Image: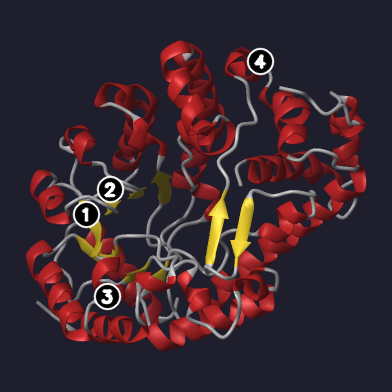
Amino acid sequence: MQDNPITINTWPEGWEEACKSLDFLPEEMREGFMMAFLEFVLTM
Amino acid sequence: MHEIYKEKRDLFRDTTALKKTKRTPNLSNFYTWKILDSEFSLKEAMYDYDKMETLTREFHNRYQFDAYIDLGVRNPIRITDLLGSGYHEIDEKNETINYVDHVVMEPEEYPEMLKNMKKFYWTKIFPRKYPNVTAEMLKNSAMEFAQFGQFTQRMTEIFVQEYHCPAVFNVNSVALIPFETFHNSFRGIKGISMDLRRHGDELLDVSDMMFETITYPKIVTAFDSDTSSYVCDTYTALLGYAILSPKQFEKYYWTYLKKIIDLAVEKNKTFFIFCENTMMRFADFFQDIPAGHVVLHLEDDDIFEVRKRLPNVCVAGGMTTELLGRGTPKECVDYAKHLIDELGDGYIFTQNKMMSFRNDCKRGNLIAVNDFVREYTR
């Protein structure tokens, strides 16, 4: 399977950046929200 | 809590506990058909939450179910559209929403997922499922996800406060059985079938990890909180089990289901299981569980046969799309009466399918059936 080499999907830098970008949420909620979001869109 | 709400909630709770009730509770299992029954097209409704709210309200005003499994919140494609691609195809001409079976995980990757699931999701599954996502697209989709959460909450509040219909379950207490993720979302039906033979132990290791770190803690939290305002305390839908033998079912499903059921019994809670396809060949697993804690919502099974084999569980379903879609109002009402009379206590009246297609139901039949079920006492 060919993986797409886009930069946001690096670990842990891309993940941390993505969580940080959720600035519409309080900081302490961002990682949990991102994980819930990820689980949701991956199983849709 | 409003008296009507309490009455409906107790009707479901007492039925689940196999107690005698004044009448049979009527549960809606209607999904896309609601849209087809409205003035809106599929796209109009699915892309506009206000329109979805309008048609869901109209659906309730017309049919007056006691509770609704779906309040217009299935298939939130606005979220995945913002990620550049989705797997739902809306076909307005044929009035269908098609889901494309797809593969985003290789069979050799179970150990990698076991090692660090979050990293695996982020670096492998997400970019394969949604290629070319930029930081901006991700943020917009996440914001849409938050809006969708608000819409879901708003719909629940409308139905609880204005219509006094109990919510069926808390979305935070859904018990996902790990096999479903691989079957429905990651490996495709063909892929997971091959994995059962070639990577069965690795699949089981990851399933154990997912159950122990995600599903079970969620259920423990749900059972320790007050879920008494809902129809049931936890909910799951089973589909992937359709490809399994009883021996495989025991390994990939029953171990986990049993653990949840045991906890439900210990904490005096209830577990609603939507059994897509057929569960009959797994019925023996359920025969020794204590009475009054489990609801089995049946799709293709003979509900009368399940009732006979499992007098310890509440059964739901029975009203067929064949009759609702092609029968006359009288035929539908006669069969509804037969279901209620024969199945007796511990029966939740509902449809045997997720009602999705135009021919699944006719408006006049549904009005006649619901008028009857609301008034009928055995």
Q: Going 30% across and 72% down the picture, which residue do you hit?
A: B26
Q: Which residue is mark 2?
A: B294
Q: What is the x, y in percent for residue A36?
A: 68, 43
Residue B44 found in image quarter: bottom right
Q: What is the x, y in percent for residue B328?
A: 21, 83
Q: What is the x, y in percent for residue A24?
A: 87, 55
Residue farthest front in this picture = B93
N-terminal of the pair, mark 4 or mark 1, is 4
Q: Secondary structure at mark 2?
A: strand
Q: Which residue is mark 3?
A: B326
N-terminal of the pair, mark 2 or mark 3, is 2
Q: Secondary structure at mark 3?
A: helix
* Distance Cα–Cα, label 4 vs label 2: 35 Å
Q: Which mark is residue B314?
A: 1
Relative to B279, say whether B321 is above or below: below
The reply to whether residue B138 is in sight is yes
